[in-house]
Amino acid sequence: MTSVAALKPASVQGRVSPEEWEARLDLAACYRLIARYGWADLTGTHTSLAVPGSDNQHFLINPHGMLFERVTASSLVKIDWEGKPVMESAHGVNPAGFVIHSAIHMARPDAVCVMHTHTVAGMAVSMQSHGLLQASQHACFFHDILAYHDIEHMESGVDGRAFLARDLGERWALIMRNHGLLTCGRTVGEAFWLMHTLERACAAQIAALSGGAKLNPISDQAAAWFGALLSKKDFALDRGQKAWPSLRRLLDDTDPSYRD
């Protein structure tokens, strides 16, 4: 019988820079938290992180086929913009994940972390023709920083990367029509905070519309004030930086195996 220890991947800590190892810890923690918050879709989604010191040309992404509850710092796969492995790995990557994340890393050097989810609430709003409604405080944070991308471009593979980069533009959040949600951040914490906020906005919208009652409107002036916090200030970056250490400590206290 094969022991659990024998199945444990060898640590790559000694083969990468201290900065890359810390980035790997952040990204592995992010995958564990995606699972903890119920945002995972078996192994069907992905989050990426640019490798420090690579001029944004290399990024880390999850090993395809591994449940997010099992992702570790050492199991993350390092690839370039063409999907080629930069470091030897026993794992491959999700082809769709490579297309989506390489498109954004190529076009947006400031988008260090890119998160993509297929949650029920996120997919439901992506299916609605009106998209995210300006009907909750959480939704108003995305006033004027939310973009939309049509699912038809998915069939184009790498040729569709230009469309994705175009549709995202300089914004930090994207609803992929009939597909799911995507957020970007200058740090893992910022991308996670944005995804958490966008996910709750979608969940609140679906819950409110399910009762059939008329929604209480929010004025454009009020919505613009919330949106300006994200578009003109470092609000999301600050919120992410404040929350992320506590989220990491939560994992350290309950299941530190992401550090392997």
Image (cartoon, rainbow, N blue to C red):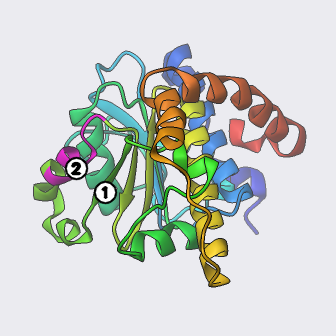
In the rendered image, the vertical position of residue 236 relative to residue 33, given as above or below: above
Q: Which quarter of the figure has residue 72?
A: top right
Residue 67 left/right relative to 183: right
- The amino acid type, in three-letter code, at marker 1 is Tyr
Tell me the residue at 33%/46% (across/down): 101
Tag shown at residue 148: 1
Front residue of 134 and 75: 134
User: Where residue 164 sits in the image (x, y, percent)?
Assistant: 22, 52
Residue at (27, 59) in percent of width and height: 149
Of the two numbered discs 1 and 2 on the same chain, state the one appearing first in sequence.
1
Out of 27 and 165, give the one closest to the viewer: 165
**Main SS, magenta residues:** helix
Viewer-side residue, 191 vs 84: 191
Q: Are marks 1 and 2 in contact (CB under 8 Å)?
A: yes
> Is the C terminus in the top left, top right, bottom left or bottom right quadrant?
top right
- Which label belongs to residue 229? none
Horizontally, residue 234 falls left or right of residue 197, namely: left
**Highlighted magenta segment, given as a residue range:** 163-170
* Residue 5 belongs to the span the image colors magenta: no
Where does the N terminus fall, quadrant-wise?
bottom right
Q: Is residue 167 left or right of residue 126?
A: left
Q: Label 1 to label 2, Cα distance in Å?
A: 6 Å
Picture quarter containing residue 10?
top right
- Is residue 130 among what the camera can see? yes
Q: Indicate the amino acid at tag 2.
A: Asp
What residue is rendered at 42% in x and 29% in y?
A: 231
* Residue 137 picture location, percent across and down: 62, 47
Q: Secondary structure at mark 2?
A: helix
Return the residue at label 2.
Answer: 167
Tag 2: Cα neighbours inside 10 Å, few (<14), some, or many (≥20)? some
**Residue 256 drawn at (x, y percent):** 80, 39
